[in-house]
Amino acid sequence: MKVGKVEEKVYKRSIGIYLPASEKQVVVGAGTGVDAAVLGKEFFENEMPMVASATFIGKPDIVAKWAIADAVNNIAASHGRAKAVSIMLTLPEKLREINLKKIMSHAGEECEKKHIAIIGGHTEISDKIESPIFSVTAFGNGVLGDAKVKAGQDIVMTGYAGAAGSAIIAHDHTEKLQERFPKRFIESAVSLDEYRYVDAAVAVAEKSDAYPMHDAGEGGIFGALWEFAQRYGIGLEIETR
């Protein structure tokens, strides 16, 4: 594709058609010539506004799914709910337009599934990169749970350590892995992307009065524990098993 801002004709046939319908709280959403989204007064529902950002670099058929999930999970782990996202997409010059369609169709599907509006963004073609870069900023609302942090609380982990990394590696290197592992084993690793959202765990945690929470993303479990301790100025005793 042509280097620079994506052309209007490309936007219409490969981006605009995949944008989900805006939620009623969005007065002005994404579209040609729209410089800024306008959110209605009821968007935050009298709760605290929340913003989280994430970036993912990878293949066209997974890049949108993981970037959106990461930003949405960060808000969920802060006791909030994402309601809209703004997308910044940078594509390599050699990428075919059919792959842009694939990226945006996945982005639209993810947002529809989570009832999230796409309220804006920008798509740029660059000759300086090799893989698509999908950056997303999520907007939502929720309550602040930090005040309940105190000594003596238990630390509980949910989900699977390394699930995201396993799913991405298995997806990106299927052919090479098949030289050593059975096809069914690789497919089971790819299917771990089913767990990319933390909604179910957050719902259980909130019912159990669990405060605060932290989304363990890149950096692994020990990285997440270090971030948690650093943020709240506390020491931790962890049963690794």
Image (cartoon, rainbow, N blue to C red):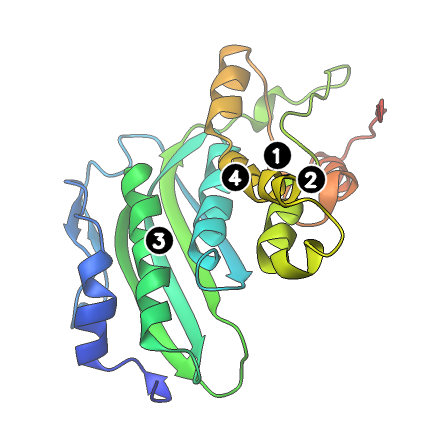
* Amino acid residing under circle 2: Arg
Residue 231 badge: 2
Q: Is residue 133 above or below residue 66?
A: below
- Residue in the picture at 43% in, 56% down: 64
Lower position in the chain sequence, tag 2 or tag 3: 3
- Residue in the picture at 77% in, 41% down: 226
In which quadrant is the N terminus drawn? bottom left
Mark 2 vs 1: CB contact within 8 A: yes
* Amino acid residing under circle 4: Arg
In space, the residues marked 2 and 1 are separated at their CA atoms by 10 Å
**Residue, disc 3:** 106
- Residue in the picture at 47% in, 33% down: 76
Element on which disc 4 rests: loop
In space, the residues marked 3 and 1 are separated at their CA atoms by 26 Å
Element on which disc 1 rests: loop
Lower position in the chain sequence, tag 3 or tag 1: 3
x then y, percent, for residue 26: 18, 47
Residue 196 badge: 4
In space, the residues marked 2 and 3 are separated at their CA atoms by 34 Å
